[in-house]
């Protein structure tokens, strides 16, 4: 299945990806070399659990900034 991934981290980068319908969002992030602990994944404007199976909808990956 083909989905569009929008990466929001100091800019916007979009890419289309071919993923297995059995993949989770955590596996999607790892395939992009993104640490799942430092981002949030959104689908349709709502956050998505990383252990959920990837759906046909486009996703946004937002890097979380922490620090003091």
Image (cartoon, rainbow, N blue to C red):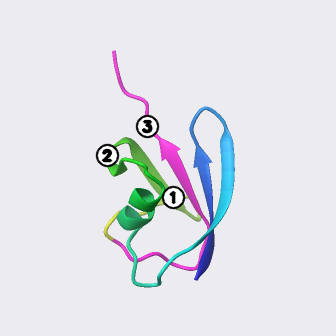
Kindly identify which residue carries mark 2.
37
Dominant secondary structure of the residues highlighted in magenta in the image: loop
Kindly identify which residue carries mark 1.
42
For discs 3 and 2, the disc positioned in front in the rendered view: 2
Crowd band around label 2 with a 10 angstrom C-alpha radius: few (<14), some (14–19), many (20+): few
Residue 64: mark in rendering: 3
CA gap, disc 1 and disc 3? 12 Å
Residue 16, x across and y down, in percent? 66, 66
Whether residue 41 is visible to the viewer of this picture, yes or no, is: yes
What secondary structure is marked by label 2? helix
CA gap, disc 1 and disc 2? 14 Å
Q: Of 60 and 44, which appears nearest the observer? A: 60
3 lies above or below 61? below
Q: Say how many tags the image has.
A: 3
What secondary structure is marked by label 1? strand
Magenta-colored span: 52-68
58 lies above or below 65? below
At 43% across and 37% down in the image, what residue appears?
64
Do the numbered discs 1 and 3 sit on residues whose CB atoms are within 8 Å? no
Mark 1 or 3, nearer chain start = 1
At 60% across and 32% down in the image, what residue appears?
10
Mark 1 or 2, nearer chain start = 2
CA gap, disc 3 and disc 2? 9 Å
Toward the top, the furthest residue is 68
Residue 57 in magenta stretch? yes
What secondary structure is marked by label 3? loop
At 37% across and 66% down in the image, what residue appears?
27
Mark 3 or 2, nearer chain start = 2
Residue 40, x across and y down, in percent? 43, 50
């Amino acid at each position: 299945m083909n989905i569009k991934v929008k990466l929001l981290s100091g800019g916007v980068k979009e890419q289309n990806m071919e993923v297995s319908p059995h993949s989770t969002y955590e596996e999607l992030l790892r395939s992009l070399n993104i640490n799942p602990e430092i981002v949030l994944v959104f689908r349709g404007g709502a956050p998505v659990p990383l252990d959920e199976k990837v759906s046909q909808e486009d996703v946004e990956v937002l890097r979380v900034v922490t620090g003091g």
